[in-house]
Amino acid sequence: MKHCTVCGAALQMRFLHDEGKEIPFCPVCNDYRFEMFNVAVCVAIFTPKRDKVMMMRQYGREKYNFLGGYVNKEETAEEALVREMNEEMGMVPLCYAPMFSQYYAPSNTLMLAYYAEVADEDVSARKIDEVDEARWFTYTQAQEAVIKGAVAERLLQEVKNRFADLQRPF
Ligand SMILES: [Zn+2]
């Protein structure tokens, strides 16, 4: 970030004691300008028995991934999670829990990864607008289908670490 997002003036690096490091500073506004980034949620949607996990293909891509979407301004991450599940899958979570967060540099996005459960496994009748294909995978199938090194692979692993019944994958 080289210019002030408010007035457009060139930013200078200035030490900010609270942060313990240099932060971009606008000499015109006389204020610090913190680096901006996107925030998104992604969610591994399981059945309550955790014998299946939902994966999907989106935006013409070949690889399967977990449901994800950006958090809108003035929206909480939890609201974004519930909204994305409803908009993209017509699903209402029974429950959900945060797993971890990870910064993803290519899209300048802080990813907030969640675990969720849904009661209704039927995806055939759903109105799916933004999803090319969505289907249930066993844990082992999901491990094979997931993009290696992606946030989704870590999410799958962390869900397994969290829940004892996944220690012996089916
Ligand atoms: Zn400024």
Image (spheres, grey):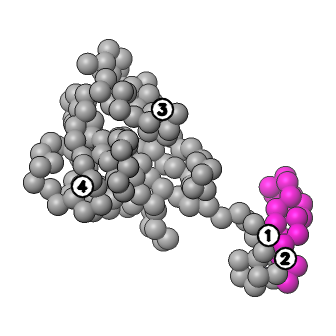
Q: Say what amino acid the circle numbered 1 marks.
A: Lys
Distance between the alpha carbons at the discs numbered 1 and 3: 34 Å
Question: Tag 2: Cα neighbours inside 10 Å, few (<14), some, or many (≥20)?
Answer: some
| Circle 1/circle 2 CB separation < 8 Å | yes
Quadrant, the N terminus: bottom right
Relative horizontal placement of residue 167, taking residue 54 as reference (left or right): right
Q: Position of residue 23 (x, y in %)?
A: 82, 62
Residues rendered magenta in the picture = 11-28
Name the secondary structure under disc 3: loop
Relative horizontal placement of residue 112, taking residue 92 as reference (left or right): right
Where residue 54 sits, quadrant-wise, is top left
Q: Say what amino acid the circle numbered 3 marks.
A: Lys
The residue that mark 4 highlights is 89
Say if 115 sits above or below 25 in the image.
above
The residue that mark 1 highlights is 2
Question: Tag 3: Cα neighbours inside 10 Å, few (<14), some, or many (≥20)?
Answer: few
The residue that mark 3 highlights is 148
In terms of depth relative to the viewer, which is nearer, 152 or 96? Answer: 152
Farthest residue, direction top = 168
In terms of depth relative to the viewer, which is nearer, 25 or 20? Answer: 25
Give the residue drawn at x 80%, y 55%.
19
The residue that mark 2 highlights is 10
Q: Nearer the viewer, mark 3 or mark 4?
A: 3
Relative horizontal placement of residue 162, taking residue 45 as reference (left or right): right
Q: Nearer the viewer, mark 3 or mark 2?
A: 3
